[in-house]
Image: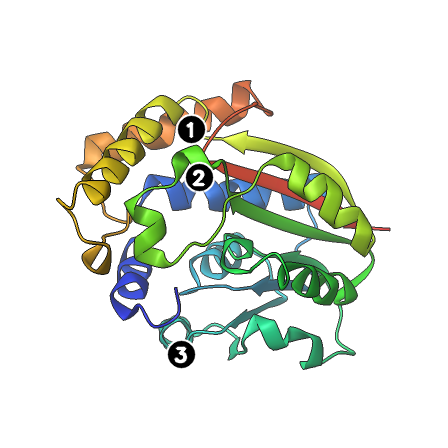
Amino acid sequence: MIGRTEEYEKMFRLEGQLWWYRSLHERVDTALQQQFGQRRDMAILDAGCGTGGLLDFLRRRGYTNLRGLDGSADAVAFCQQRELPVTLVNLKDLAGFEPAVQYDIIVCNDVFCYFTEADLPLLVTALSDRLKPGGVLVCNNNAFDLFRGEHDVAVGIIRRFVRADFECLLPQHGLSIQSATYWSFVLSPLILLIRQWQRLQLALGWHSSDKAQSDVYLPSHWINETLYQAVRTERAILPRTPFGSSLFIVSKKL
């Protein structure tokens, strides 16, 4: 998504409001509590932090040892507006950045989708190397090619994943999957319908790929709250689901 200034601007404005970001941030917080209880002093790195919505959320939840990295100058500028400790670093160069510094937790949300099959193992190696023994890697990922649509084109997503991809990849780099679930299960028929319609519009030339728009927009208040509550209820009742547009994984360094 680097270079798409308008998408970062939308992200910055909407991260604290949009149902999807709110749901993801709460999911991360829950994962941290499941791993570390009520501690708030763990060293946390958000690798590919975007405009800092998650870091800001965690700061407001009382976490005190936060750091962010992102390869977009636009994203880092927005993080600076939030007064967050974020550094401009291309994650492809992570292996050479502060190699001696390690973290209890690394969050890497919706980043792997921008890495090719050749480059992704190098990133996972670098992330694993930055974790302390017993450290935790939390990642959210775009799931299932069925959900590919105009959003993917707009933000430059090059691949989507299924759980089997990570069952093969992560153990090769000393990471053991603790939990994994697809999510937005209850909303998946609606999301799938929208994405398939987007694909049809692109295929027929009704929309052009160079003017593609992401799904990052704020619907009316009642729709936004209804979607948020639907996903929140799903998480409470169905902690693991077999299908959804995202795949949330918690893994631990051996």
- Mark before the other along the chain sequence, 3 or 2: 2
Looking at the picture, does residue 128 appear above or below residue 81? above
Is 236 left or right of 100, judged from the image as shown?
Answer: left
| Residue assigned mark 2 | 23
Q: Which quadrant of the structure image shows residue 204?
A: top left
Query: Type of residue at label 1?
Result: Val
Disc 3: which residue: 73
Tell me, yes or no, if residue 225 can be seen here.
Answer: yes
Comparing labels 3 and 2, the label whose residue is closer to the camera: 3
For residue 254, side relative to residue 202 (left or right) = right
State which tag comes first along the sequence, 3 or 1. 3
The residue beneath circle 1 is 231
**Quadrant into which the N terminus falls:** bottom left
Q: Secondary structure at mark 3?
A: helix
Query: What is the distance, in whole Å, between disc 3 and disc 2 at their CAs?
Result: 26 Å
Q: Position of residue 12 (x, y in %)?
A: 32, 62
Amino acid type, label 2 = Ser
Sequence-earlier tag: 1 or 2: 2
Secondary structure of the residue carrying tag 2 is helix
Mark 1 to mark 2: distance in Å? Answer: 7 Å
Most foreground residue, 80 or 130:
130
Quadrant of the rendered image containing residue 239: top right
* Vertical side of 174 occupied by 37: above or below: above
Given contact means CB atoms under 8 Å apart, are the residues at marks 1 and 2 in contact? Answer: yes
User: Looking at numbered disc 3 in the image, what kind of residue is underneath it?
Assistant: Ala
Q: Residue at x 60, y 49 (%)?
A: 139
Task: Reply above or below: 98 against 45.
Answer: below
Q: Residue furthest left?
A: 206
